[in-house]
Image (cartoon, rainbow, N blue to C red):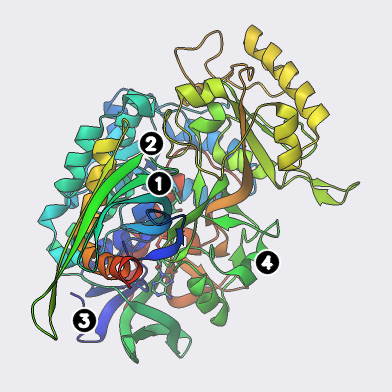
Amino acid sequence: MPGFISYQSIDELNSEWKLKIDLGILSRQVNFRARITEKRKPEFLSFELKGLDENVMGSGVLLLKKESITETSVTFKISLEAGGQSAPLVNSLVSSALRSQIGEFETQLRKILIP
Amino acid sequence: MLEIGDSEFDVVVIGSGAGGLTSAILAHDRGSKTVVLEKSRMLGGTTSISAGVIWIPNNIHSLDAGVQDTREAALTYLRRITMNTGDTGLLDTFIDEGPKMIDYIGTHTPVKFGVSMFPDYHPEFEGARHGRSLDQEPFDGSILPPDIFERIRRSPFFPPITMRERDEWKSILNFDFELMAKRIENKIFTMGSALIGALLKGCLDRNIRVIPEAHVTNLITKDGKTIGANVKHDDGYVAITADRAVILASGGFDWNDQMKKDFLRIPVVTPLGVPSNEGDGITMGIELGAGLGNMSEAWWSPVIKVPGEELEGKPLARPFNSERALPGSIMVNRAGKRFVNEAHNYNDVGKALHTFDPVSFEYSNIPCFLIFDDNYRRHYNFLTIMPGDPLPNWILRKNSLKELALELGINGDVLSDTVSIFNKYAETGVDLEFHRGASDYDRAYGDIAVSPNPCLGTLAVPPYYGVQVLPGTLGTKGGLKINSESRVLNIRGALIAGLFATGNVTASPMGGGYPGAGVTIGQAMVFGYLAGIYSSSDKN
Ligand SMILES: Cc1cc2nc3c(=O)[nH]c(=O)nc-3n(C[C@H](O)[C@H](O)[C@H](O)COP(=O)(O)OP(=O)(O)OC[C@H]3O[C@@H](n4cnc5c(N)ncnc54)[C@H](O)[C@@H]3O)c2cc1C
C-alpha cells in the first residue's frame, strides 16, 4: 500500500486522504474521510477511516515512544474492513496487501499526522 | 532458475505466456535443451491475467462431455466467421492439431481442463456449437517454489473462480465470496493464472529454465540462420545461443503507440494486456526480413477506464460483458442513438466502435456511453461495484436523461427518444433494431429471472447513470507470417531458418474473426505445440 497521493485537511479533526492501494498488480486510488478520535501530542493519535467511494471502514492508532535521545519506538495499528457482499474477498486481498506494505504506509502516515 | 547461468541452449523461447511455455515443454520433450526468456519481472504475460479459456473444436474433453462436433462443422464455422480474411491453410492446421495439443498438454503436464458449455460467439452460424471452450481447474500455487509463485499475477479482472462456476452462479450476487477468500489465502489460482501456474510447474518438473527480467533486444544470425538472441539482464547484455531454433512468443504490440498508429485500423486503442507487450518480437522479425499479416486487426473489446486504477504502472482499463447484456442498460453514441446489439460478443461490439462517418468526418461511436437506470443499479453489479456500494465519482448520476446527456455530451432529445423506443422493445421482448437477447450468446450474460427477454429491461427509474466507453483490445493479432509448422516466413514467402513464432506475435489465421471463448490462447498453444515439435527437428 505505498503511499498517499494527497492529503487535504478539512478542519482540526477531519481530513480527506487519497491513498493508492496496491492489491498485487492492480493498484487503485481509494478516497477516505479520516477523523481523528483522540490526539495526545506528540505521541499518540487514533483515527477512523471511511471509504468515500468504496464500502470500506477502518481505524488505527499511532503511538510514538521516546526510548532515548536518538531512538523512538513506533507502534502502528491499522485495520480496514470491507462491508457488503464481497467483503470476505476484499478483506482477504487487503490484508495480504497491508501485511506486505505496512512499513511504508506507516512512514507516510507519520509524516503527515505528526510533522 | 532466476539466473541466466550458462548461455548455450538448443531452443530459446522468447516470452512466458501460454504460447511460449507450451512450445518450451514440447521442445524439451523432443530432446532440446530449452530456456524461456521473459522481459517482465512477472511471468505469464497477458495469459496470466486472462480467463484462461481455450477454444479447441473436436477436443477429447468436449466430445466426452457429449458435444457433437466434427472437423467439417468446425471448418465451416471458422470459414464463415473469419470471412476469408484469415489464412485458410492455417485454419486447417489449427483444427487438425488442436485436439492433439490438448491431449498432450492434458496428459504430460499438471494442466487440468474442464468443459464449459458456453456457446460459440455466433451460435446461429452453420457449424457453431456449445462446449468447444475448455476452462482451467483451480491450480494449487503452494506447490510452486515461493520465488515463482510470487511472480505469477492474479488477474485484476477476474475474481478467483472458474469460468464454470461463473456460468453456474450467473450473477455476482450469487458468488461464493468465502470460497474466493479461502482460495487467495491458500494460494489457489484459477483461470489464466491457473493455466500459467500449471504450465510453469510443467517446465520446472522438466528443469526447463524460465528466466524473468530477461529482455531480448535482438536476434543473432549466422549465414541466414537464427542462432540466438541478445538479452538485457540485470545491468548487462548476454548473448544466448540457440543451436536449433529461436521461438518468438512475445505477444502483440498492445503497448507500442507508434506501431498501433502505423498499423491498426483506428487511431487510438486502449490495451488490456500486460505493459511489456510492445511488439518487440515483430520488430525483431522485421529485422530478419519477415513477412507481416493481419496488422490492422486486434482481439477487440469495448472498455471502460476507471480513474486511479493501474496495471504495473500503466492505466488499467476494464472489459465488460454482463453490463452490456443485463436488462436496463443501453449503449449510445454522441448522437444519442444505439448502434449495435450491446449484448453481442466483445470483439464484434468492439468493431462497431470503429464506424467512420464520412459526412461528419468522425468516428461516430468514439466515445460512446453505457447508460443505465436505478433499477439496474439496485439489482446488478457494475464492474467491481456491487448494488449498495457507494457510487464512485467516475460514474455520472443525474435525475433525468436530459441532464445526464448534457453532462456527457450526448444529444439529449435523441437519447430520450432512443430510450422510449428501447423501453417498448423491453416490454415486447423483441429488439426490432439490433436483436439484443435473440441469441444464446447474448442470453448467457442476461438475467434469466427476467422475461420475456433476459437481456431487455426498461430504463425508467431515475436517477440515471452513464459512463464513457472506448475502443480497446485484449491484444493485437497481426504480426509475423508463419507456416503450418510455425516457421516464420520472409516477405517473399521463404523460410527464415531457425525462427519460429506463435501467439499474438504472429499474423492470426483468424483474420478479423473471433469464433469463440478461448481462441486466442487456443491458437497460441496450438502453434506453440507445433513450434516446439518442429524446432526440435532442426539441427545446426
Ligand atoms: C481480461 C482478458 C481476458 C482474456 N481472456 C481470454 C481467455 O479466456 N481466452 C483466450 O483465449 N484469450 C483471452 N484473452 C486474450 C489472451 O490473454 C491473449 O491473447 C493471449 O494470452 C496471448 O498469448 P501470448 O502467449 O501470445 O502472449 P502473452 O501471454 O501476452 O505473453 C507474451 C510474453 O512475452 C513477453 N515479452 C514481450 N517482449 C519480450 C522481449 N523482448 N523479451 C522477452 N520477453 C518478452 C511479455 O512480457 C509477455 O510476458 C484475454 C485477455 C484479457 C486482457
Residue type for callout 4? Lys
Mark 4 Cα shell of 10 Å, populated few (<14), some (14-19), many (≥20): some
In three-dimensional space, the C-alpha distance between marks 3 and 2, rounded to whole angstroms, equals 37 Å
Q: Quadrant of residue B206?
A: bottom left
Q: Label 4, secondary structure: give it.
A: helix
Please state, as top left, top right, bottom left or bottom right, where the C terminus of chain B lies in the image.
bottom left
In three-dimensional space, the C-alpha distance between marks 4 and 2, rounded to whole angstroms, equals 33 Å
Residue A113 percent coordinates (x, y): 32, 65
Q: Which residue is mark 3?
A: B3
Q: Quadrant of residue A45?
A: bottom left
Question: Where residue B133 is drawn, which disc sits there?
Answer: 2
Residue A64 percent coordinates (x, y): 17, 69
In this view, B382 is above or below B189: above
Residue B156 percent coordinates (x, y): 38, 50
Q: Residue placed farthest to the left in the image?
A: A67
Earlier residue among tags 3 and 2 = 3
In three-dimensional space, the C-alpha distance between marks 3 and 1, rounded to whole angstroms, equals 31 Å
Q: Foreground: B311 or B143?
A: B311
Question: To which chain does the residue with label 1 belong?
Answer: B
Residue at (45%, 45%) from the top-left corner?
A: B519
